[in-house]
Amino acid sequence: MNQRVAIIGAGPSGLSQLHAFEKARLNGIDIPEIVCFEKQKNWGGLWNYTWRTGLDEHGEPVHGSMYRYLWSNGPKECLEFADYTFSDHFQKNIPSFPPRPVLYDYITGRAKSENLDRYIQFETVARRVEYDQDSDQFQVVVEDLKTQQEQCQTFDYVIVATGHFSIPNVPHLEGLESFSGRVMHSHDFRDAEEFRDRNTVVIGSSYSAEDIALQMYKYGARSVTIGYRSSPMGFNWPEGIKEVPLPMKLQGKSAQFADGTDQDDLDAIILCTGYLHSFPFLEDSLRLKTHNCLYPDGLYKGIFWQDNPKLMYLGMQDQYYTFTMFDAQAWYARDVILGNIALPEASVRLEDMTTWKTREEALSNPFEDIDFQTDYIKDLCAATDYEDFDLDAAANAFKTWEHHKVENILTYRDQAFVSPCNGEKAPVHHTPWLNALDDSMAAFLATEKELVVKAG
Ligand code: FAD
Ligand code: NA7
């Protein structure tokens, strides 16, 4: 096969794609030439923690949005690779809600085991992608950030795996310009320690607002007032966290919310207002324009750009499932490129997208959202040889997780789930999340006995 495929991004989605091709190659299948461009020094995408905010050492926007003490916000059983389980990687059964370094080790462990780095050009940023109708190929301009040299290469397929939780959505809230405390977006949040004994406001009512409010609580902020636009998260918040409606009126260091709640002596406002899908390197006719939703417009099977299916996107959906979904998408994309799956004509693709989009528009609660994304992954997996696993069990685990959060938002991470891949039930972690201040892999993987010995 003398075709060439460009993969842009070596985060979890890009690594799934590399793995899918590598698996085919190891099975004796002739695969195209694959080149993956990654702007960071290392792989793992958002899971590759950086202390940096703003611009990186090359003057590029920092990709990372994860914070130092982030722990998985969903059960690991719902994101497990079917062909490389947590037990395969760690050689033991581990608890359900690992801290970031453990998940980083898992994702990159599968990639390391296949030496996938040989396909990746690190510190190389995609600058421009254009499609040439005459040759039916893409011109991809990349810059080596170390030498600042640009280079143009030709590819038959382009797979965009650059993520969509990196460029912050920063709305203007009235009065912010005169607020004398700190204002930041969750993209730049790294450590709640700096807010110990501080009064904080968190804007937003989704995953970032929820988890950053919990981080503030865990690390000793004096108060957290969460301002929501549409509806509150409604959890049973501990004393010190409350949810109030926007808009808020700011004056000096004081805020007044729509329900009359006043908060004085405010030190910081954290905008947990989500992210923008941003692809500055794509020519306009190739650029996905969407918001954070379960079925972005214009992507057949949630992957193929309708106007030019040789351009593919991975992981552009809002995510219940993450690594599992990226694998399912990567397998499907690979099989289309290898000619195992024939894409139908444009009108049939449009009809399929419309059916999914219509269903998405009718979704009215998280359980329906979970079923939607489960069915989406099932639809992809049915067409490929991705390893069998019990997706219904994963969907049920997500629903149980939702119940746990409603029961007690402080303890949901202390629960244990059953793997949909090998049926093993996870052990309960030795330390409740709220008291677990050491997020290292060694501490997480240690047994209670080992911890006692270490403590002396
Ligand atoms: P990313 O991880 O964003 O990776 C994209 C890669 O593309 C990066 O390496 C980036 O450097 C590279 N790139 C970008 N632009 C270019 C360019 N022009 N040229 C070359 N390379 C480029 N998911 C979970 O499963 N569990 C969690 O607990 C969880 N917590 C999260 C917490 C936060 C704060 C955030 C923001 C997300 C969280 N997620 C979580 C979701 C996360 O989106 C996925 O887990 C996953 O990282 C998405 O993988 P990706 O490869 O699609 O994108
Ligand atoms: P999300 O899930 O896209 O949520 C964005 C939130 O920001 C949502 O609650 C929005 O409110 C709120 N928002 C957006 N614009 C505004 C304005 N102008 N004013 C007030 N509130 C606003 O992003 P997250 O960062 O929470 O989560 C993204 C990923 O990061 C996720 O995968 C996590 O695992 C971590 P709305 O509800 O629309 O009124």
Image (tube, grey):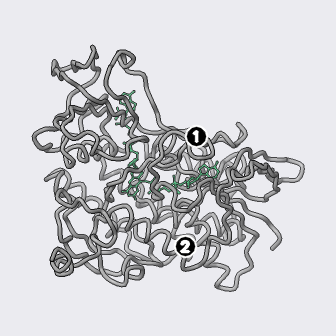
Q: Mark 1: which amino acid?
A: Ser
Q: Mark 2: which amino acid?
A: Ala
Residue at left offset 19%, top offset 63%: 414
Give the crowd class for mark 1: few <14, some 14-19, many >=20 residues within 10 Å.
Answer: some
Q: In which quadrant will I find the N terminus?
A: bottom right
| N-terminal label among 2 and 1 | 2
| Quarter where residue 174 is shown | top left
Q: Is residue 356 visible?
A: no
Residue at left offset 34%, top offset 70%: 441
Give the crowd class for mark 2: few <14, some 14-19, many >=20 residues within 10 Å.
Answer: many
Point out the residue furthest to the front here. 456
**Residue at the disc numbered 2:** 111
Q: Identify whether 286 is placed above or below 162.
A: above
Left or right: 444, with 104 as reference point: left
Point out the residue furthest to the right here. 134
Kindly state the secondary structure of the residue where label 2 is placed: helix
Say the numbered circle drawn on residue 41. Answer: none
Q: In which quadrant will I find the C terminus?
A: bottom left
Kindly state the secondary structure of the residue where label 1 is placed: loop
Pick whichever, 97 or 200, lies toward us. 200
| Quarter where residue 341 is shown | bottom right
How far apart marks 2 and 1 lie (CA) works out to 26 Å
Pick whichever, 142 or 336, lies toward us. 142
Q: Position of residue 102 (x, y in %)?
A: 37, 68
**Residue at the disc numbered 1:** 278
Residue at left offset 24%, top offset 54%: 402
Mark 2 vs mark 1, foreground winner is 2
Q: Is residue 316 visible?
A: yes
Q: Position of residue 39 (x, y in %)?
A: 62, 53
Left or right: 266, with 370 as reference point: left
Left or right: 215, with 31 as reference point: left
Q: Position of residue 294 (x, y in %)?
A: 45, 48
